[in-house]
Image (tube, rainbow, N blue to C red):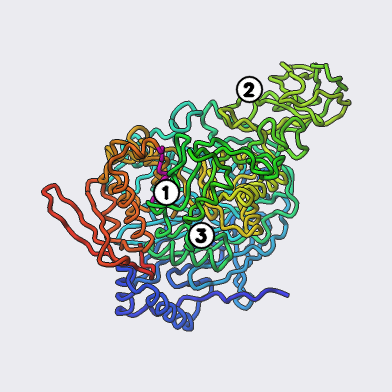
Amino acid sequence: MKKPRARGQMITEQPLSFKVTRLIKNYIMIGNNFRHFTGWLLLIFLISNCSNKEQGNFSTLYFEIKIDDKGFITSMKNNTLSPHREFSPADKPSPLMCLYDGEKQVYYKPIKAIFNEAENAITLDFSNGSVAQISLETKNKYFKFTLESLSQSEGIEGVQWGPYHTNITNLFGEIIGVARDSSELVNYAIGMLALDDNTLGGTSETKADAAPFQYIIHSPDPSIYPLPDSLHEGQVFTLGGDGINDVAFYAHKEPYFRIMYGNAATVDDKGRISINYQSRDRTKKREVYYSLIPNMAVNTPNHLEVQPLPGIDYIGSSIALWGSPDSLALMDVIQNIVLSEGLPYPTINEKWVKDPSAFVPDAMTHGGLNDSIISYTSQMGFKTISMYDQGFVRPDRGNGGYIDGSDFERKPIQLSSGNKSHKEFSEMAAKYGITIGRTTITTALAPGTKDASPIPSDSLCYQQKRLLVNSISPDDTLIVVDDPTHLDEIASWEGHAENLNMIKIGKELIYYLGVSESKPYRLLNVKRGYWGTKALHHAANDTIYKLQVTLNYGYDGLIPNMELQDKIAAYYADVCFINGLGYYDFDGQEFLFNNGHGYYSAKRFFRKMFERAAAHGIPPIRFTGATLSEGSWHYQSIWNVGGGKNLYDVETREWGSSTSQGKDLRDVTYANFFPVGMGRNFAINANSTVEQYSHIQAISVGLGTTYSLELNQKEVESCPQKYEIFRTISIWEKARSANAFPRNIKKLLVDPKRNWILEQGENEDSWILNEIKEDKEKIQFILHRNDNYSAT
């Protein structure tokens, strides 16, 4: 039996009356009485869609599209204004779906579309003879498209939704796929979201489903940031530095150098933004030539045989396509899609982690003494302590999640009154509503851990698989292989660490470096029994696995295959449950891409971790990490990577005074409706002042940022103003949580030249915001709790 589907809503031929249009515009711009407004607009939407219909025209509350008889979207309009504003460029119609032949590396576009109103379905014929059946459900605030079937699919590796071209040239969200014009004049956004794990932000041609990490040229406003004659829109540049030092990646302070963390949105040579999602058939064998930073010599790609995943293909791929006023997009539309479609919805303090009123900094330990850390954190109103000075948690399933021993006998957290285990310290923090957390190396299987050595798992990810030509004894170093192809490639793409170049035969790890150029093809510089494994006898025709690995600098490890990765995800949830943790910093988060499944791998990892946490009955795990991707966007709460003057310099009041990292990451997160990160920063010391933290909090609230506040107990105690600083931060955080800052005030707060003081008002739900001028004049604003979310 087919599941019931809503009918496609057709556009009324009659425009909304001038009075209604004017009222809608005023409500959107002002953002007041929001719940009343949306309910009233829904009534208009339902009434208008009972009028004359035209095949191929569909509308939601805020958005209308037209799909022509060839299967192209030829119109995308803001239907909240009259006349409706057009966002589809006349010279670039958008294919509803494309098919991708991975072997030929070609796309097939639709050539014919038939609409079946009774079935609420669209049949698309493609230039290669394939026929797709697509269901369309028109929701109040988005369109839901689902691929139900595809005939003549031989050779079709993937399907791509779009690209959907727009004439928007302001902000692009390359992680979640959104084109935004945030200006007061236009105030509109068009975006997409995947509704299943195997539909990913990006294009079908993306190698290993993780887009290259690089710069693209794009001016968000050419009148303010004109491009020099030597540059053009859409031009690509590699990162800065030597390819190893991640801080040096961020090398361009110019506002038109935009760093890329995905390709769900791209720009053309006119600066116009297009968005796209794709889904791949993962059931079949394929090889990719992959590096996350392919344009840097030190990070050149490696050939990787990608593990087939039974049952994971593109049939059932589903997206939400939406358009709305930009000021309403996150909390009204995107949140509605997430809730309606059952997408991940992690919360903190009973609020969605994407809700700007839920943004809250975290405390980060430094110096090894923790007597007062919980007290400091509580006084500022923070909810999490990152035990950063404890080093890495390495995934070791051998300990069963008991990172301090089965009886919690290890006491790594130092207090003057007696050291504590994680469980003991977490119980102390929980009395104040505070969770604790640790930094991990994600899926890097380090030497000496259960799945790496001395007995390596049989569920490791490998780059290449070959056969042993001759049998070898435990002492032999002459290892002959049947095929040398790609075995000369060193370790992994990330730094090509020579000491991690190894193979696995049976239960033995073997180091080598290089392969002979002529038959018999033998591995060079062989070291048997590597990483503490036992040198064993191996028979002719035994399988040789060239292993996929990580990099050096304390991250040394092997990469698991997908089944083992699932177990490691569950392990991290177990660690939280057993030891009382509620937070992780996933350093090395990019390792999730190293199996060749890219953003799908990340989605699957975090889904498994969250599902296991839910089974334990613990809250959603708050986490940051080394990167942000479409695979982690729904699950990830914050992104406080890096720190100090590279992110935000409170002394010079600029985003990144030493590198462009602050500017780069600010622009990425803001465009993708994600909390901006200010990194590990703003350590309280003897010279810290209240004025500094008033400024930090003003920027944080105005732009929507979080940060990890470094707390060294000895340094904090040396600060004469520490209690006033705690109180100042607390007042700002309480007002933020109360959603007390309207949109017009936030725009003032982001100006680094302004100085602010926030004081408690006449009751706990009111605040007095004073702007302090150079002549000591005060400009005063009275703020109040706002439980009805308005446009922000």
Secondary structure type for disc 1: helix
Which residue occupies the foreground of this view, 14 or 444?
444
Front tag of 3 and 1: 1
Secondary structure type for disc 2: helix
Does residue 73 appear anywhere in the picture? yes
Front tag of 1 and 2: 1
Q: Which stretch is magenta?
A: 705-713
N-term-proximal mark, 3 vs 2:
3
Does residue 107 appear anywhere in the picture? no
In whole angstroms, how far apart are the C-alphas of marks 3 and 1? 24 Å
Q: Does the residue at mark 1 contact the one at mark 2 (Cβ under 8 Å)?
A: no
- Residue under label 3: 347
N-term-proximal mark, 1 vs 2:
1
Residue at the far front in the pictured view: 417
Q: Does 35 appear above or below 778?
A: below
- Residue under label 1: 375
Q: Does the residue at mark 3 contact the one at mark 2 (Cβ under 8 Å)?
A: no
At label 3, the amino acid type is Thr
In whole angstroms, how far apart are the C-alphas of marks 3 and 2? 42 Å
Taking 457 as reference, is 718 left or right?
left
